[in-house]
Image (cartoon, helix red, strand yellow):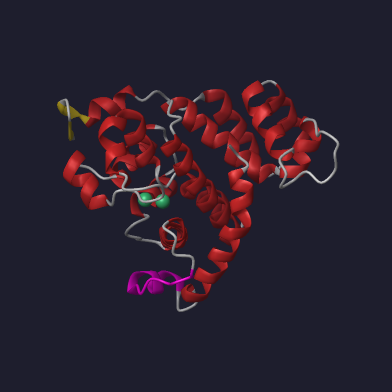
Amino acid sequence: MAMENSQGTFSLDRHIESIPALETSRMRLFLVLQDEDADLERVECVISSDPAMAAKVVKLANSPFYRHANQFLGIHQSLLTIGLDMVKCITLSMAVMDTLRCESRYAKSLWSHSYATALIALSLGRGKAEKDCLFTGALLHDLGKMVFLSRAPETYIPLVAFEGSWPDSDLERDVFSVDHTLLGESVARSWHFPEEIVRIIRDHHSPKDLNSAIVYLINHVICRYEKGETEALAPDSRTIRSYLGDMYKDLVNTILQRYKMNNVIVENLF
Ligand SMILES: [Fe+2]
Ligand SMILES: [Fe+2]
């Protein structure tokens, strides 16, 4: 794979090879959280040994959205307050952020978008396996954009027309010879994510199964909202109808409501 930038052509394969393995201690915690029998004591023990994680959890629990009394919440109460799903969100995103080392405001806005997508996907999943898969796939669906921001910010950032308006896949392919879906797929594979999660990342703009159709729809609603189009409008898509049935138009309203509800929480994650 080759990529053009202001300094000339360079190998994307080489860039993927240069991306280190996902940060292991946080991935260990993520696996603990995926475990159905994850108990709070064990989670608290792991988080307490990771000051950056603990700080993020405590900050969120003490943010105006959650905090109802004047008393400061310590780590134990904070975990109870925000819940293990939110801890999962923080853990996986911090593992990816630390690995890619990218903290620009563009990266932050992309994470907000990804958190929101993941929390809605989690709420739409049925059964633990489907919820886990949808959650992780949705949180990482734009992984390729994060890699562009991390490895080629000087070329990628000028393509962002305005906050919330990311370059489409055609423009990415014109400039980099690859779009964020295929780049995300390659990186997720190199990180050994399960196949069903890799497929969500690869197919979230052209769904090929139920899970990628769900993430497509959530992404569609959120992207419209981020561009200032606040009315729920379902895409007229035969593909989406084939996976989700006619009810997909109702689902658009549910997604928008949940997005507005979660948005306040997501803003407090930074
Ligand atoms: Fe995308
Ligand atoms: Fe997206």
- Farthest left residue in view: 8
* Number of marks in the rendered image: 0
Residue 42 percent across, percent down from the top left: 74, 30
Task: Pick the residue in front: 184 or 221.
Answer: 221
Magenta span of residues: 231-244
Asked if residue 232 is positioned above or below residue 133 in the image, the reply reads below
Residue 144 visible somewhere in the drawing:
yes
Q: Quadrant of the C terminus?
A: top right
Residue 38 visible somewhere in the drawing:
no
Q: For residue 188, what is the image quadrant?
A: top left
Task: Pick the residue in front: 117 or 230.
Answer: 230
Q: Quadrant of the N terminus?
A: top left
Tell whether 216 sits left or right of 35.
left
Residue at 73% over, 39% down = 61
**Residue 8 in magenta?**
no
Residue 210 percent across, percent down from the top left: 44, 63
Tell whether 18 sits left or right of 212.
left
Residue 23 percent across, percent down from the top left: 50, 25
Residue 109 percent across, percent down from the top left: 47, 42
**Residue 239 in magenta?**
yes
Residue at 43% over, 32% down = 104
